[in-house]
Amino acid sequence: MDPELTRRLIHLLDHVEHWLPPPPVEVDWTRDVAALWQRHALGGRLLPVPPRDALGLDDLLGIERQKLALVDNTRAFLQGHPANHVLLWGSRGSGKSSLIRALLNDLAAEGLRLVQVDRHDLAALPLLVERLCRERQRFLVYCDDLSFEGHDDAYKALKSVLDGALTGPPPNVLLYATSNRRHLLPEAMSDNDASRRVGEELHHGDAVEEKISLSDRFGLWLGFHPFNQDVYLEACCHWVTQLGRASDWTREARAEAIRFATLRGGRSGRAAWQFANHWVGRRRLHGTG
């Protein structure tokens, strides 16, 4: 190479180097328990992330059946037994994402590792799975708040990894997803136009079959629903006690918790957590607790 050109290139690099992002930190799965998958033009990369909080499974109230099913499925997977991909679906704020975080916090010591994938990066999902299959750890590939619009083809990559490819996912990878939609895709009344009755059987048209086929690839469906008032107040009491003291849960707190949920238009674990922050924070601010 021409020495003058080399000198000029070095000079240019010296000027732009401080504008470049730092090199990505390599994931060490013996130390890191979670990572984010980011797609780029050349494939994708894993970025290690620390646990968001110390939330445990015992902190989540009102979803005992869902907790038991998810823990059993995950422990079977960790021990090399057959296990299913899982779809956690249902109303907002009902504990779906929190259950995944608590699961990782409680089972990381048993070897569980988690990689979160944004919906917009699903096109690179096969590359991620290919990379994880070379690791010795066992991974949950997790997509939060997963849903697709009618014109969105990104779900095809997910279908392929779940069950559509010839080889299927490797034995050390499971997919867990949360969604407010049971079938992940929008459903319209017109989808039923092609459905027909044959004898005593209902045969769905192609539009319905296409939408059901994605969620049907998750072997375990866990539904989450709004709390009744007793469960909601139990959750409020738990979080008020956790964030403050047992003495902070008073008759006045109970009445305020009911008003808080009424103003929000629903009772959920998220509403209970937000009420506890509101109540304990206000009491400490005004010195009443």
Image (cartoon, rainbow, N blue to C red):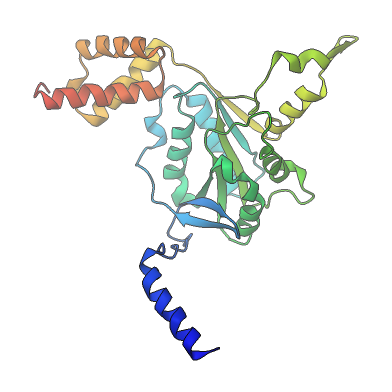
| Left or right placement of residue 90 versus residue 22 in this view | right
Residue 33 locus on image (x, y percent): 45, 52
Identify which residue, 181 or 55, lies in the foreground.
181
Residue pictured at 68% horizontal, 52% vertical = 170
| Left or right placement of residue 118 versus residue 160 in this view | left
Q: Residue furthest bottom?
A: 3
Residue 161 locus on image (x, y percent): 69, 46
Q: Residue furthest right?
A: 199
Identify which residue, 91 or 248, lies in the foreground.
91
| Left or right placement of residue 26 versus residue 136 in this view | left
Residue pictured at 41% horizontal, 14% vertical = 266
| Left or right placement of residue 216 versus residue 29 in this view | right
Residue 205, placed above or below residue 258: below
Residue 257, placed above or below residue 113: above
Residue 213 locus on image (x, y percent): 74, 31
* Tally of numbered discs: 0
Residue 232 locus on image (x, y percent): 37, 16
Report whether residue 253 is seen: yes
Identify which residue, 282 or 28, lies in the foreground.
282
Residue pictured at 44% horizontal, 16% vertical = 227
Report whether residue 74 is seen: no
Q: Quadrant of residue 127?
A: bottom right
Q: Quadrant of the C terminus?
A: top left
